[in-house]
Image: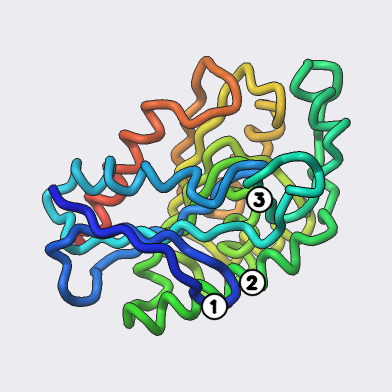
Amino acid sequence: MNIHHEARSIGPLTCNVIKSESQTGSPDLVVVMCHGFGAPGDDLVGLGPEMISQLDQSDGLRFYFPQAPLSLLEMGIPGGRAWWMLDLEMLALAAEGKLERDQRDDTPEGLVSAREQLAETVAEIQKETGLPMSRIVLGGFSQGSMVTTDLALLGDEAPAALVIYSGTLLCQAEWKQAASDRESLFVLQSHGRQDPILPFRVAEDLRDLLSHSGCDVQFLPFDGPHTIPQIAFEETINLLKRLLSE
């Protein structure tokens, strides 16, 4: 299958846009997928062609991969991007298993700005495609999943679904209150039991917060570290198949 790939500014963010070359009109479904802290803006782009190739209705699907707004060049990470800044020393300690990062009561400085910029980009994607939020899947990996969770819960409208790859619980009180207005939102969440960066037990608490608020959570625990496992890839494809058939 031939894939069309272009990078361009959409709202305040640069996005990599992936679709099949045979897609001539507007898509039936959009996926907005956000990368994690320290990754380049095109880190997750390879997921687009892989998933499109697995779908019979691929002409109806379009991926947008926004590039996080902050450069990490001055922090010694050439090409690295961030949705908000992190303490690299604390991150290194967590990676070495010397620190457990439970951030459930934190609202990171920069999260609100990141959410607002992503919301503006998503609004432009809606104008471009003519699709309502109910036909847009929000998702991401690690920090990217945190900003999309924040937007999915606090945005004006619920998305078609939320995909959380190796995310964590932030802003606990605010997210809990907002989640009560997202009853029946489908959430696909994966997390490694050996994740040293974002603790598995906190991921379980995020799952429980969402499910107890009425969200329909499919939780995919796996034996592994801070990554996207094959089972999450496969279940994301199943989710897209289901949404495309609706």
Which quadrant of the figure has residue 18? Answer: bottom left
Q: Residue at x 42, y 75 (%)?
A: 125
Question: Type of residue at label 2?
Answer: Gln
Residue identifier under label 3? 81
Give the distance between the C-alpha atoms of the residues marked 3 and 1, in whole angstroms.
17 Å
Q: Secondary structure at mark 2?
A: helix
- Write down the residue under mark 2: 117
From the top left corner, tell me how far across and down residue 143 is, in percent.
65, 46
> Which residue is label 1 attached to?
11
Instruction: Choose the circle earlier in sequence order: 3 or 1.
Output: 1
Q: Amino acid at mark 1?
A: Gly
Q: Is residue 216 left or right of residue 149?
A: left
Task: Say what secondary structure mark 1 lies in.
Answer: loop
Q: How is the image coloured?
A: rainbow
Which image quadrant is residue 196 in? top right
Q: Are marks 2 and 1 in contact (CB under 8 Å)?
A: yes
Which residue is located at x 50 percent, y 34 percent? 190
Residue at image point 60% right, 54% down:
213
What numbered label is drawn on residue 172?
Answer: none
Residue at x 28% of width, y 40% of height: 50
21 and 158: which is toward the camera: 21
What x and y, as percent, mark residue 62? 30, 62
